[in-house]
Image: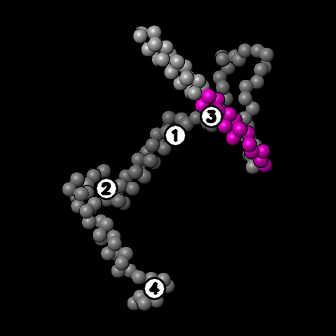
Amino acid sequence: MTINIGKTVFSDAGRICRIATAMALLSAGMLAAGGCSTSNTSNTAPVAGVEGPKDTGSYPNLNIPPQVAAKQLTKEETDAKLAQLKGEQQAQLAKSGGGGQTASPAALNSLAKNHGDQALKQIETKCDPALDPSCN
């Protein structure tokens, strides 16, 4: 009796493995066929400046500092830029009246409840004579 159970279990496992292998091969074949079905290369853009690694025949010298892409800012220039940004931030806060304060949750909840209705009323009261000839 034990032999029959083992035989059934192992034969089912083999069948499942064969089905899974067949499905994997079919899906790989479909991907390969689908990936190679186009031959239109007129829309491809050339890749500029990508050459990849080159074999120079020698090891790189890590003692030579690399060339920088741009001139580095001095401490004074950095401080001047930060002061300018802080000034612009303060001007923006003063313009909006924020002052760095956030609205209370109750005010935000009230705004969320009423804003949609208020916006709809505002839109409905305005009419454009160009779009609606019956508009006053």
Three-letter amino acid code of the residue under disc 4:
Asp
Question: Mark 3 or mark 4, which has the lower sequence index?
Answer: 3
The correct choice, above or below, for 71 with respect to 6 in the image is below
Question: Mark 1 or mark 4, which has the lower sequence index?
Answer: 1
Q: Secondary structure at mark 4?
A: loop
Say few, some or many: other residues with alpha carbon within 10 Å of mark 2 (under 14 / 14 to 19 / 20 or more).
few
Residue 41, magenta (yes or no) = yes
Q: Secondary structure at mark 2?
A: loop
Residue 94: name its quadrant: bottom left
Residue at (36% x, 78% y) in the render: 124
Q: CA distance from mark 1 to mark 4?
A: 58 Å
Q: Nearer the viewer, mark 2 or mark 4?
A: 4
The correct choice, above or below, for 49 with respect to 2 in the image is below
Question: Mark 1 or mark 3, which has the lower sequence index?
Answer: 3
What secondary structure predominates along the stretch shown in magenta? helix
Residue at (30% x, 65% y) in the render: 115
User: How many numbered markers are drawn?
Assistant: 4
Three-letter amino acid code of the residue under disc 3:
Ser
Q: Which residues are magenta?
A: 22-42
Q: For mark 1, what is the residue?
A: 77
Q: Position of residue 92 (x, y in %)?
A: 39, 56
Q: For mark 4, what is the residue?
A: 132
Q: CA distance from mark 2 to mark 4?
A: 40 Å
Q: Position of residue 39 (x, y in %)?
A: 78, 45
Q: Which of the pair 78/130 is nearer the observer? A: 130
Q: CA distance from mark 1 to mark 3?
A: 60 Å
Q: Position of residue 2 (x, y in %)?
A: 42, 9
Q: For mark 2, what is the residue?
A: 98
Q: Which mark is residue 27?
A: 3
Q: CA distance from mark 3 to mark 4?
A: 58 Å
